[in-house]
């Protein structure tokens, strides 16, 4: 059990607090940060949310009052230099806050990591609060707020929390969904969150570029191991042809996992800088974060990823082979 009262001491002692989350943020990182922001404002903290990436279109409803800023050293450097505490949500890996990490190290700022991804024993944070059982980081932020504050959460907090829980459970469908998620949802509905409207904003607002790109990848899915393993590649030419951005490919691996017989889906995405991003999704029979960490990344048992500084040409066969052998080992075929 996490002692949220203990964690609360670190937050109470800090006057100025920066909230941030991993690059290319998803609903969990953004929802956790905005929920915490509304709580910290309520108790009169000087706090700001600064993201190293621009805000994806579908999450603009969390940004009432322009509370989510995009990191810019010239604009934020001075303010960051004097903050007492940086709270980092859902990061998975400290590196994934990019330029903000440099400022933290440069000014020796205390950090509080709140996450449901595994971190090594010798983690770089001042305080490391990890709950691997939590379906989302938003679950943890909810627990914190409920511990230190009386009554129901406010609607503004609830919109962040609901966004976090909904997106990290794939709309309450994935195996991480538990009764706690549903209990949180009940409170969010009770305080006025329009859950249908949130759903539509996130899941029914695909850009034309996204649909064009999805059409391309669906034509070229590779099946291995009697169709238990499916993988696909998105290279920069496909991205350019579809005029797609990284935000457009969110959820593609989940989609490929929905194919009958597929247990593990893998996406290999070529980044603009020539490095590659790997995404792994498992239906639950095979654990895939081991392969992800072999390739330099990590994540959850059934949802993991890695950024690899290699070209598609050198990485692809290695990633396919490693995933195949992980599946075969676990299924007793190797
Ligand atoms: Mn998460």
Image (tube, rainbow, N blue to C red):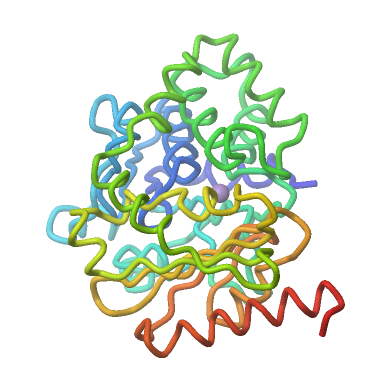
| Left or right relative to 10: residue 48 | left
Q: Where 205 falls versus 3 (above or below)?
A: above
In the image, residue 133 lies at what x, y percent? 74, 49
Q: How many marks?
A: 0
Residue in front for this viewpoint, 216 or 27: 216
Camera sees residue 78: no
| Left or right relative to 259: residue 78 | left
Q: Quadrant of the C terminus?
A: bottom right
Camera sees residue 146: yes
- Tell me what residue is drawn at x 60 percent, y 84 percent: 321
- Tell me what residue is drawn at x 70 percent, y 82 percent: 325
- Tell me what residue is drawn at x 66 percent, y 57 percent: 262
Picture quadrant of residue 178? top right
In the image, residue 231 lies at what x, y percent? 52, 67
Task: Return the residue found at the far left.
Answer: 74
Task: Return the residue found at the far bottom.
Answer: 314
In the image, residue 282 lies at what x, y percent? 66, 58
Residue in front for this viewpoint, 66 or 42: 66
Residue in front for this viewpoint, 120 or 18: 120
- Tell me what residue is drawn at x 54 percent, y 53 percent: 256
In the image, residue 162 lies at what x, y percent? 54, 28
Q: Where 100 falls versus 71 (above or below)?
A: below
Q: Where 101 falls versus 186 (above or below)?
A: below
């Amino acid at each position: 059990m996490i002692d949220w009262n203990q964690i609360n001491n670190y937050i109470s002692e800090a006057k100025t607090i920066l909230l941030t989350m991993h690059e290319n943020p998803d609903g969990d990182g953004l929802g956790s940060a905005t929920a915490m922001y509304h709580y910290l404002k309520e108790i009169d903290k000087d706090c700001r949310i600064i993201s190293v990436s621009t805000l994806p279109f579908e999450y603009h409803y969390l940004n009432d009052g322009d509370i989510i800023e995009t990191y810019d050293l010239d604009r934020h450097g001075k303010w960051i230099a004097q903050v007492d505490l940086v709270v980092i949500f859902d990061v998975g890996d400290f590196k994934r806050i990019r330029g903000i990490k440099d400022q933290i190290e440069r000014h020796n700022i205390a950090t509080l990591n709140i996450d449901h991804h595994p971190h090594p024993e010798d983690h770089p944070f001042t305080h490391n609060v990890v709950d691997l059982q939590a379906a989302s980081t938003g679950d943890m932020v909810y627990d914190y707020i409920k511990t230190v504050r009386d009554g129901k959460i406010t609607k503004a907090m609830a919109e962040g929390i609901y966004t976090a829980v909904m997106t990290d459970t794939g709309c309450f469908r994935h195996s991480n969904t538990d009764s706690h998620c549903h209990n949180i949802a009940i409170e969010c509905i009770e305080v006025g969150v329009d859950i249908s409207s949130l759903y539509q904003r996130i899941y029914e607002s695909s850009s034309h570029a996204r649909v064009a790109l999805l059409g391309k990848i669906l034509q070229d899915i590779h099946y291995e191991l009697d169709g238990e393993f499916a993988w696909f590649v998105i290279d920069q030419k496909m991205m350019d042809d579809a005029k797609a951005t990284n935000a457009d490919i969110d959820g593609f691996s989940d989609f490929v996992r929905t194919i009958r017989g597929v247990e593990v889906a893998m996406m290999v995405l070529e980044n603009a800088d020539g490095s590659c991003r790997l995404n792994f999704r498992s239906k639950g029979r095979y654990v895939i974060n081991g392969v992800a960490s072999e390739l330099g990344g990590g994540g959850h048992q059934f949802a993991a990823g890695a950024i690899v500084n290699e070209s598609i040409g050198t990485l692809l066969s290695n990633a396919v082979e490693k995933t195949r052998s992980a599946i075969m080992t676990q299924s007793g075929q190797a």
